[in-house]
Image: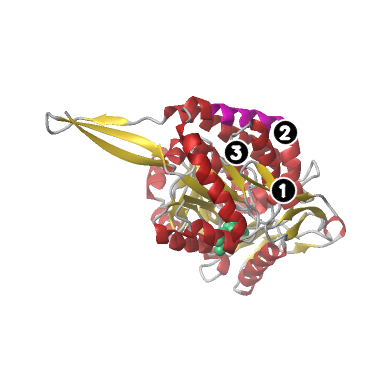
Amino acid sequence: MAEIKRMFINGEWVEAEGGERIEVMNPSTGEQVGAVSFGDGRDAVKAIAAANEAFAGWSRLTARERSKYLYNLYELVRKHRDELAGIISAEMGKPLREAKGEVLGAADNFMWYAEEAKRVYGETIPSSVPNKRIMVMKQPVGVVAAITPWNFPVNMVARKIAPALAAGCTVVLKPAESTPLSAVRLFELIEQAGFPKGVVNLVIGNPELIGQEFTASKKVRKITFTGSTRVGKLLMEGAAQTVKKVSLELGGHAPFIIFEDADLDAAVQGLFESKFRTSGQMCICTNRLYVHESVLDTFTDKLVERMRRTKVGDGREKDTEIGPLVNEQGLNKVLDHIQDAREKGAHIAYGGQRLTEGEYAKGFYCEPTVLTNVTKEMKIYSEETFGPVVPIIPFTEEEVVVQQANDSDYGLAAYVYTQNNSRCFRMAEALEYGIVGVNDGAPTQTQAPFGGYKESGIGREGGYYALEEFLETKFVSFGL
Ligand code: ADP
């Protein structure tokens, strides 16, 4: 039996009150890679109390003092980058090269917010009467409850806790139950970085029970969540009980549009980045590929040719470009979307099957797949697939493709490839998405705002925008 990893509450490593534990599995091989203590609402209550207790001290530190802890953490995460990447890869199958990129992204967040912590500026505003002065100050919202998914088990945590801590908030984090080991290792580094006890707490366990404590507690003043739209709506509803602030990063269904004047080689590369990273399991992944009819055949040939050279395999192997899906349920959803499209008339230009032979026998692998003749009636056209499947839809008119691209309940990311400058601007303005990659298939950066329109979410992560999400605005009127 592997060592049981524990939760981190009020500066101590503790077992769940209920004594439960769960195993963590590697989706590349089906092997057990660890075990963790698995808590419930009682553990959440303890962690919230600890964060609440720590808030006064942490929020009163100078920004420079808070910055030092974040900077320590930045250095530790960088130093342990290979080890953290190995854990990510072992518990959710991400290729090592990508996992290292993720860890560096997390480190970058800690550094960026270590800097930005020092720049939480207020304002003075000219008064309309001579005997008053208007001052605006920014203050931390209070205790933050953060819930993160499994697809970026280190960086999703960093993107939430770095700005929260920089703003002066204290935090309780609940990571996804399939990837707790990355969070535990990150919290060991948080402990090493020297944060005062209770400032950052880790609770692992039953999502419903912990989520209920987070939403019901009057001490928690903010919920920050990344995950499915279904759970985001539940949390928003729950948060209404105490009118908490919420930031939600939810699902997506990104259109990727290739015009007749696009650089097709760049478009293939961009599509690869937007579609196949994390095996297609990112909320900004392409879900509908619109290709201008005049370049459809050339583009499809180039794409298929690139896919033939792509190595699918165990995330921990050096040459792996695409890993497995996270679990059987994830794999089945992808296979169901392929099957449904097939039955409704789609043609498989490449792939289309589960991989089951040899090295693939015990993991959850799906061949990277290209579907043509995709139509609106197919599930894949409107539901998030979360897997390595490219559905191609031909188009001819710019206005029509804009309408089609916007015809979605989601509004997270969209991509456009064209070499016409005027069209770049027209498209960037017309697409109802929070992130638009113009000739760019991988638009995320630490300092840029990340978030969605419509049912893709509320609020923004990244840059100064994320810091704002953890700050209250206070108006002080001075009578003279
Ligand atoms: P995914 O389909 O990507 O797993 P989920 O929304 O189910 O997306 O999970 C994202 C995060 O939300 C995970 O940490 C999960 O444990 C958590 N979660 C799932 N259900 C609930 C719930 N009812 N309340 C609070 N958190 C939840």
Q: Nearer the viewer, mark 1 or mark 3?
A: 3
Q: Earlier in the sequence, mark 1 or mark 3?
A: 1
Q: Which residue is mark 3?
A: 197
Q: Amino acid at mark 1?
A: Leu
Q: Are marks 2 and 3 in contact (CB under 8 Å)?
A: no
In which quarter of the view is residue 133 placed? top left
Q: Is residue 260 in view from this perspective?
A: no
Label 1's element? helix
Considering only vertical position in the picture, is 131 above or below 263?
above
Classify mark 3: helix, strand or loop: loop
Q: Is residue 438 left or right of residue 148?
A: left
**Position in image of residue 270 (x %, y %):** 59, 43
Q: Amino acid at mark 3?
A: Lys
Query: Are the residues tagged 2 and 1 within 8 Å (C-beta)?
Result: no
The image quadrant where one finds ligand 1 is: bottom right
Say which mark, if any, is on residue 418. none
Task: Say the numbered circle drawn on residue 80.
Answer: 2
The mark nearer the N terminus, 2 or 1, is 2
- Specify few, some or many for label 3: CA neighbours under 10 Å numbering under 14, 14-19, or 20 or more: some
| Main secondary-structure element of the magenta-colored stretch | helix
Q: How many marks?
A: 3
Answer above or below: position of 149 versus 439.
Answer: below
Is residue 353 or residue 259 the one in the foreground?
353
Q: CA distance from mark 2 to mark 1?
A: 14 Å
Residue sitting at 64 percent across and 70 percent down? 342
In the rendered image, residue 181, in percent from the top left (x then y), is placed at 72, 48
Query: Would you say residue 455 sits in the magenta stretch?
Result: no
**Label 1: which residue?**
181
Q: Which residues are magenta?
A: 67-79
| Spatial separation of the CA atoms under disc 2 and disc 3 | 22 Å
Which residue does the image show at 41% across and 47% down from the upper left? 427
